[in-house]
Image (cartoon, rainbow, N blue to C red):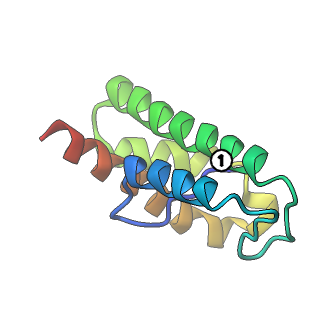
Amino acid sequence: MKETVPSWRFDLEACLADFETIRDLNPATLLYIHFEPHSSPEALLAGYEEVLTGWVATVETKREELGVDDAIVEHFVNETEMDDVWGREMIRPVAAVDVRGVLDYLDEQGE
């Protein structure tokens, strides 16, 4: 499972709240778009929760290290491991949007 936050309005707390809403529904199966059904929703939710919180922490750490948002975006665009899945030309802009979404979220948290 890989991070994907394709929104310039990414909000970690809202994502975590969505996970709780799904848990409260107690689904027997969880369907992610573009993937097959999963019959263990709790494990899938917990896994993605960990991926998202880890992703935000990783971007935050890289921001502390590099300090310049464009450099941070470039770092993650160059380090993506999804080239072989989507192709370099498609994944680069997606990775950039994902990183910028987290950077904007971090900015909002600091306000």
* Label 1 crowd (10 A; few <14 / some 14-19 / many >=20): some
Give how far across and how far down residue 98 sits, in percent. Answer: 48, 57
- In the displayed structure, 64 sits above or below 44; it is above
- In the displayed structure, 73 sits above or below 35; it is above
Q: Which sits in the foreground, 24 or 41?
A: 24
The residue depicted at 80 percent of the width and 64 percent of the height is: 85
Give how far across and how far down residue 86 sits, in percent. Answer: 75, 69
Q: Which sits in the foreground, 23 or 50?
A: 23
Q: Is residue 1 visible?
A: no
Instruction: Identify residue for label 1.
Output: 48
Q: Which sits in the foreground, 105 or 46?
A: 46
Decide if residue 7 is on the left or right side of residue 25. left
Decide if residue 75 is on the left or right side of residue 86. left
- In the displayed structure, 66 sits above or below 68; it is above
Give how far across and how far down residue 72 sits, in percent. Answer: 40, 41
Q: Is residue 54 visible?
A: yes
The residue depicted at 28 percent of the width and 31 percent of the height is: 67
The residue depicted at 64 percent of the width and 71 percent of the height is: 89
Q: Which sits in the foreground, 34 or 69?
A: 34
Q: Amino acid at mark 1?
A: Tyr
**Quadrant of the image occupied by residue 83:** bottom right
Image quarter in which the C terminus is found: top left
Mark 1 element type: helix
The residue depicted at 76 percent of the width and 76 percent of the height is: 34
